[in-house]
Amino acid sequence: MVRQRTVQIAEVVDAAESVVQSKINDFWKELERAPLMRKVEKIYQIVSPSSTGSIVTGYKYEPSRLQALDEKRHEVTHRDRQSYRPEDLEDDLTFLFKTGFHLLSLPVEKYNLIALQRPEPGS
């Protein structure tokens, strides 16, 4: 029967790696369609920054503002294209760019990635 079957360690390791990779792929597929704030919350959950500050000059992370902008984006995209005020564009884009840089900086700070040697271009 199955209990008496011999299994090589390599088979078990390969199978385990396949299961783990499949679970990771499932997680990314699920997250791809998730709301913006859920994605940001996942970043914060994984990276667990030590402070609420940011290395981005003149930036403070404001989840409520990010949520409001995402709701505006959804409104303009799916309902009322005229609902966005063009005079808000520059300020909103600046906030979104800085938010992107802030989110990218979190794992860099946590894992000290600036200190790591980077590969040479073309290598």
Image (cartoon, rainbow, N blue to C red):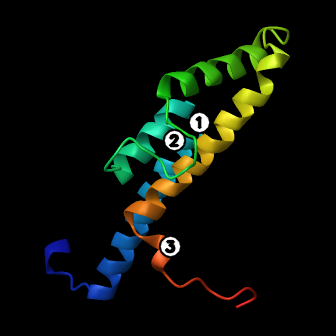
N-terminal label among 1 and 3: 1
Vertical arrangement, residue 52 with respect to residue 71, above or below:
below
In the image, residue 110 lies at what x, y percent?
A: 38, 61
Q: Nearer the viewer, mark 2 or mark 3?
A: 3
Q: Left or right? Give the position of 103 relative to 95.
A: left
Given the image, on which type of amino acid does mark 2 rest?
Glu
Q: Which residue is mark 1?
A: 33
Image-quadrant location for residue 96: top right
Quarter of the image with the N terminus is bottom left
N-terminal label among 2 and 3: 2
Secondary structure category for the residue under label 3:
helix
Give the residue at x 43% y 69%. 18
Secondary structure category for the residue under label 1:
loop
Given contact means CB atoms under 8 Å apart, are the residues at marks 1 and 3 in contact?
Answer: no
58 or 94: nearer the viewer: 58
Vertical arrangement, residue 112 with respect to residue 60, above or below:
below
Given contact means CB atoms under 8 Å apart, are the residues at marks 2 and 1 in contact?
Answer: yes
Give the residue at x 26% y 86%. 9
9 or 69: nearer the viewer: 69
Q: Left or right? Give the position of 17 relative to 4.
A: right
Image-quadrant location for residue 119: bottom right
Secondary structure category for the residue under label 2:
helix
Give the residue at x 49% y 39%. 40
Res. 1 visible in picture: no
C-alpha distance separating marks 1 and 3: 31 Å
Quarter of the image with the C terminus is bottom right
Q: Which residue is mark 3?
A: 114
Given the image, on which type of amino acid does mark 1 rest?
Arg
Q: Which residue is mark 2?
A: 30
30 or 35: nearer the viewer: 35
Given contact means CB atoms under 8 Å apart, are the residues at marks 2 and 3 in contact?
Answer: no
